Image (cartoon, rainbow, N blue to C red):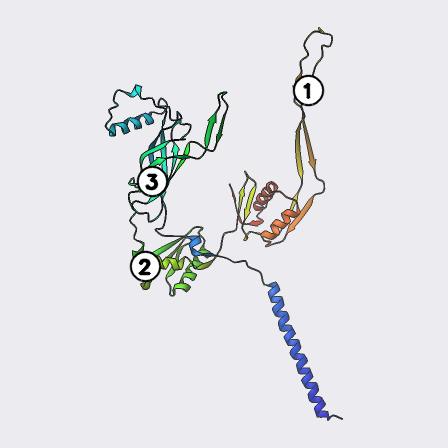
Amino acid sequence: MQPLQYRKNRQEKKGDSTLAFILLFLVFLALFLGLKTSPAHAETTARIKDIVNFEGIRDNMLVGYGLVVGLNGTGDKLNNEPYTEQSLMTFLERLGINTKGQEQNIKPKNIASVMVTATLPPFSRNGSRINVNVSTLGDATSLLGGHLLATPLLGADAQVYAVAQGGVAIEGYSAQGNTGSSITKGVPTNAFISNGAIVEREIDYKLNTLETVNLALKNPDIATASNISAAVNRKMGGHLAKVTDPGTVQVTVPPEYHAAVVEMLNVIEQIPVETDQVAKIIIDEASGTIVMGENVKIDTVAVAQGNLVVKIEETPLITQPGPFGLDENAPINTAVVPNSLVTVNENADKKMTIFKKNADLRDLVNGMNALGVGPRDMISILQTMKAAGAIQAEITTR
């Protein structure tokens, strides 16, 4: 027989282990419920290089006026386009050919006035080549087989930065038969010259000498700009980056990167950051396209959609009225009489979906699909919900 004190100790130990088990169970239960009830937040990360533009690293637009020659009778009509005639005469005079008093005799059909455009990439050097686009300015019907004469390309400061010349490649074709029928594909009055311009002037911009660099956000947002500033400071150390406005983060070049700003930018552009965006809905009514961001929230609202169908059918009738007592030899006229049938069907089985407060994009889409709503009807419903103040998002119609 066990002593009384021994049995008492065993019971106390058993009670302590049971209490410990209960406490451990409660801890795990609290953690489980906390995980289940904590709201899920989808974070989107992107590299800094994909969401910002660096100061000074940008394209520049160039434009020029020129002449395309060698067309097969598809050029400008000089009677209708006097600037083409004047440009041709000026060009010939520069080559030492006197054309004064010969205006009536200059009637070529193989020349066209064109506008030449190009994009000058950042840090382009003298002698490098860039692509150019050529578009007719007058009534020329095609640039097929044409050759662009030397054309200066000007920047916004009216300075010449490149010169374009070369054979053009059109972006379509046009053909006409002997019977007058014709076919056109693409736009034969637009053309392209690969590497058709030579850079003659460089844009002087010394990136490595900058003391501060501005990062311009492609989609300005205060939260995203703050995340960029914090990420750069963590990576570079110190307080080098600061937000100057929702679209700009200014980074001070540290001493170790003086005269080596390019290397600093190489480090910065690889830093991942969390991006944020304004709750927005984009609607393209022409194509019925709807794009909604994940931050779109809605308040409690009930939506009903009545399926109203308007159907118009054209069933033409063919009639052959007889003589009806008139001359039996009279011709019988066959006529086609239009006949339109309009029917309106309304589905009596109406459905209603209730969206709860703070419903997200998934709830909204699932609810719309439950109603069997198509893109066109969804546009109308979204606009109506916005008018009722139920959608907490900006709606933009294109």
Q: Where is residue 24 drawn, in percent x and y?
A: 63, 75
For mark 2, give the secondary structure: loop
Q: CA distance from mark 3 to mark 2?
A: 31 Å
Pick the front one: 51 or 117: 117
C-beta proximity under 8 Å, tags 3 and 1: no
* Image x and y of residue 265, in percent: 37, 57
- Counting residues from the start of the chain, the first of labels 2 and 1 encountered is 2
**Circle 3 is placed at which residue position?**
197
Q: Which residue lies under the disc numbered 1?
A: 318
Vertical side of 394 occupied by 90: above or below: above
Q: Left or right: where does residue 64 sit relative to residue 309?
A: left
User: On the image, numbered disc 2 is attached to which residue?
Assistant: 260
| Separation (CA) of disc 2 from disc 1 | 85 Å
Residue type of the residue flagged with mark 1? Ile
Instruction: Compare marks 3 and 1 and give the one earlier in the sequence.
Output: 3
- In the image, which disc is placed on residue 91? none
**Image coords of residue 55 (percent x, y):** 36, 52
Q: Quadrant of residue 329?
A: top right
From the image, state whether disc 3 or disc 2 is nearer to you: 3
Q: Nearer the viewer, residue 220 or 131?
A: 131
Is the residue 130 above or below the residue 172 in the image? below
